[in-house]
Amino acid sequence: MRKSGSADFVYIISDALSSLKESKGTTALTSLTLGFSLAIFSLFVFVISNLNGVMEGWGEKTQIVVYVKDNVSSAEAMKDSIMKVAGVRGAEFVSKEKALSELKGALKGYEGILEGVDANPLPASFEIKVLEENNSPEGIAKVVGELKARDWAEDVQYSREWVEKLASFIKFMKIAAIGVGVFLGAATLFIMSNTIRLAVYARRSEIEIMKLVGASDMYVRAPFVIEGAVQGLFGGILAFAILAAGRAAIIGQVPSYLAFALEMPFPVPVFLLALIMAGVVMGVAGSLISMNRFLDV
Amino acid sequence: MRKSGSADFVYIISDALSSLKESKGTTALTSLTLGFSLAIFSLFVFVISNLNGVMEGWGEKTQIVVYVKDNVSSAEAMKDSIMKVAGVRGAEFVSKEKALSELKGALKGYEGILEGVDANPLPASFEIKVLEENNSPEGIAKVVGELKARDWAEDVQYSREWVEKLASFIKFMKIAAIGVGVFLGAATLFIMSNTIRLAVYARRSEIEIMKLVGASDMYVRAPFVIEGAVQGLFGGILAFAILAAGRAAIIGQVPSYLAFALEMPFPVPVFLLALIMAGVVMGVAGSLISMNRFLDV
Amino acid sequence: MIQMFHVSKSYEGGVPALADITLKIGKGEFLFITGPSGAGKSTLLKIMFGSEPPTQGQLILDGRNYIKIPQPELPALRRRIGFVFQDFKLLPNKSVFDNVALSLKVMGIPPSDVKRRVARMLTYVKLQHRANFKPLQLSGGEQQRVAIARAMVKDPAIILADEPTGNLDPELSVQIIELFKEVNSRGTTVVIATHDKALIEKYARRTIALEGGRLVNA
Amino acid sequence: MIQMFHVSKSYEGGVPALADITLKIGKGEFLFITGPSGAGKSTLLKIMFGSEPPTQGQLILDGRNYIKIPQPELPALRRRIGFVFQDFKLLPNKSVFDNVALSLKVMGIPPSDVKRRVARMLTYVKLQHRANFKPLQLSGGEQQRVAIARAMVKDPAIILADEPTGNLDPELSVQIIELFKEVNSRGTTVVIATHDKALIEKYARRTIALEGGRLVNA
Ligand SMILES: Nc1ncnc2c1ncn2[C@@H]1O[C@H](COP(=O)(O)OP(=O)(O)OP(=O)(O)O)[C@@H](O)[C@H]1O
Ligand SMILES: Nc1ncnc2c1ncn2[C@@H]1O[C@H](COP(=O)(O)OP(=O)(O)OP(=O)(O)O)[C@@H](O)[C@H]1O
Ligand SMILES: [Mg+2]
Ligand SMILES: [Mg+2]
């Protein structure tokens, strides 16, 4: 009785590679399906990452305005005091003069209305931005409460309605994105594993024969592992190519103020690598799981 | 030599049905893949239809404002004259008084600024909406040109920037939607046809044997047609179920001002029927095309 | 019934399987084809059946001259010929009954006739107790008998049988050949490719021998 | 070498294929198994090979007692047994050479040895000119010889051959059996299931006969 020799591993790999050549057809079909499925899923990831950016941008615009009493404190001192409030990210001073000129701008063509007005009745103010993590109705309320306690503060205004609407919108978008993401993830996983299962099914008698000739489970599995990896590799590259080509085709059409929508959420090599890795993991796992039940011969 | 008898058709159908039972496994896998693919594609159609609605809503908001000279013509006469301009959909009169009170509202807290002003310096105006088909920079320009020619018109204002931005945004969204739609359509078609091809491939020797026993091409095709139809039927129903379940799960989370995003673009039965028809056509066509090359025995 | 003129066949890859075969098989004849493994027996039968086109030469079936039998005529031709394949070619997902019934169904025979004829045929080949088995649940010889039953059940004008007793014991082989003889006596042309010297000697019918693709006696 | 005690086998669906078989095959023995179609010959061989578990009884292989051979031990066992399957079981996508080489490769034999041994084996079964063909491009008898070559190339301790000459002409059959005799004379245990009375008579070795799953002489 011979024990397995050192040539074992070489055979396992070389046989697996030549079996890959024999099943070019199904491998190609499976690669294409993997590629398209991955492309669909990553198109979604792409869109969501960029939408997230937009939503964060909106979040940044949430502003609190503190109108300040005349001649109580210096602008610098007030700014320092504001920046100390937990949750505040930035504050911009708007002087009385700037407020007036902004009003004039808003009334353009009818500035005459202000002709009789001598003293500037408008107060100076600070426009305040809050940190991302405080950008919720409760977080805003806390900041507003602290600002109101300042003795130089005349009034603190913010649009409760806008804040709440924005918060609920972002929450909804997150839920919808998770929902669609889970669905697309499940769908692509399902599609890929079914495709692999059908391809393996067509080769079940091969598996049986290999086992009957005395091949170890590893020997029988190897071609499927390699095939799965190759399918995943090509699938990942295909998915990347589809997305890159789609982006290239569309990018000239995009008005510049929308260009952010096509920004790559990750660096290109990371994206390509992630797609390939996802493809390979799915291909290998799918092949192994699908073939396992035919091994028991 | 016997000619085909009347029992032919009965056999073709009954054999096809029993062959369906024998290949439950692959039929189920293929149905699932079809279902998920269709669901992905129709999720896209769903989102796009509703986005279209939103974009049309935005379009409606594009306004042209005509400021009118005092005491030249009556409001009714001017409105009639405006409505005669091609491309105008509606016009709303804003009186001098209303304009002033709107300004006061905008200056809330600082109304004092207007205290010295006795005569109302603000003109009356019309806010005008244009028809959908004129909602382009050129269409707007034409309407504006005509309105300027009215002798009672003091000034015509519209935000060229906003109109152009909106138009380019809508154009971009349409291109992006077509791009994504073509990609998703191609991807789902590809996935479905590959899946069917793999399933047929596993049965190629069956086709050969049937032909060798003297079965006509129709006899051999029948099981594949019926299988394709059944796969399409189940696939279509599955796709509908996935979407309906997803919508039901998400609908409670939606803030009311966003409910429009989940409106069904078509009546439910039409939607279901369309999905089933799409599934059946794809299933049958896919099966027939895939098997055809094995018929030549 | 079947005539071949200077028929040659080379498979892709340039393997010459048959060379210059001229052969006449009369209606109602009973013919053995013999010859060593790889001599071209199966190829000769496949050419008569239209499933392999000859590379050269002509084929006359029922007075019609074919160079290559056109695809649309194949189903009608095959319904008239019962072929016992060397590798059986049974449908793995169908029962024994359905495998045999198939060759009647494709001809449009009414269901009650099908039932009766298939049942009788299965009795002839001693498989009545296996009617509901799938081919993979049968022994080799049982599978071979299903293939024989499927070829004979339709009372074909011609039976082409490729090594039909290779998996059968001698007693059963004789019984099967007796079946072939019986349908032959009712007018069916029978051509059997076989290695079984004992059968050929026992029945002493016209026998042609192939070797390396050539007729060595005719 | 191989012992069976009161082995019975019923397939799913309740078909009794073997009943109460007690049998001892010594090391280096040469044994024919015969019996009519469906008698249980293939089933008996499959039980020795571990690819069908017996329903009852015990099996001793190399002094080890099995009720059911455990899955992880099967590869090692199968590398020691050369099995010629009744339906050949060749890999359709691999060449003749690769089909035969496979049973050496799974044992980890070095490539140069594999080449040499496969080439020599193919010469023995007269298939050296078909080394690069795929199984479906071969005649029935050629396929059968590939199956035989694959079983013998690894110099197994035991050869189980199921109807190995069913598709071979008498001359070739004798040559193949001579091959079996030769490896047997070098110590390999050989068990052949066959219908071929001529071979059994010619070689006059120990023969057991099955009928309806029972031993009728032992
Ligand atoms: N599809 C094919 N492609 C290439 N060569 C083939 C093909 N089919 C058969 N051959 C070759 O043609 C020759 C004749 O084959 P055929 O099957 O006719 O032989 P046979 O007389 O039936 O042999 P056997 O008794 O072994 O069945 C063989 O050498 C075989 O290798
Ligand atoms: N997988 C199975 N399921 C059910 N019954 C089976 C199965 N395999 C074999 N049988 C039955 O078991 C019996 C013995 O089969 P076996 O293959 O051992 O016969 P055999 O002696 O090899 O016959 P042959 O000479 O025809 O090959 C047969 O009646 C067969 O129908
Ligand atoms: Mg042959
Ligand atoms: Mg057997």
Image: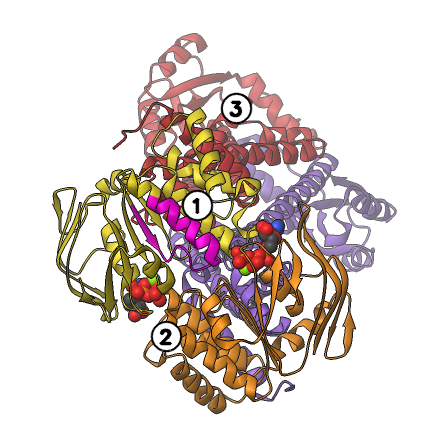
Chain colours: A purple, B red, C yellow, D orange
Q: Quadrant of ligand 4?
A: bottom right
Query: Label 1 is placed on what type of residue?
Result: Ala
Region in magenta: C159-181
- The chain letter under disc 2 is D
Is residue A83 something that shows in the picture? yes
User: Looking at mark 2, is its residue's CB closer than 8 Å to ligand 1?
Assistant: no
Q: Is residue A81 left or right of residue B10?
A: right
Q: CA distance from mark 2 to mark 3?
A: 119 Å
Subunit ID for the residue under disc 1 = B
Closer to viewer: mark 2 or mark 1: 2
Numbered mark located on residue B92 in the image: none
Does A206 sit left or right of C28 as displayed? right
The residue to which callout 1 is attached is B176
Label 1 Cα neighbours within 10 Å, binned few <14 / some 14-19 / many ≥20: some
Q: Quadrant of the C terminus of chain D?
A: bottom right
Label at residue D171? 2
Task: Determine the chain carrying the residue at label 3.
Answer: B
Q: Are marks 2 and 1 in contact (CB under 8 Å)?
A: no
Amino acid carrying mark 3 in the image: Leu
- Determine the residue positioned at 37% across, 69% down: D169
**How many labels, in total?**
3
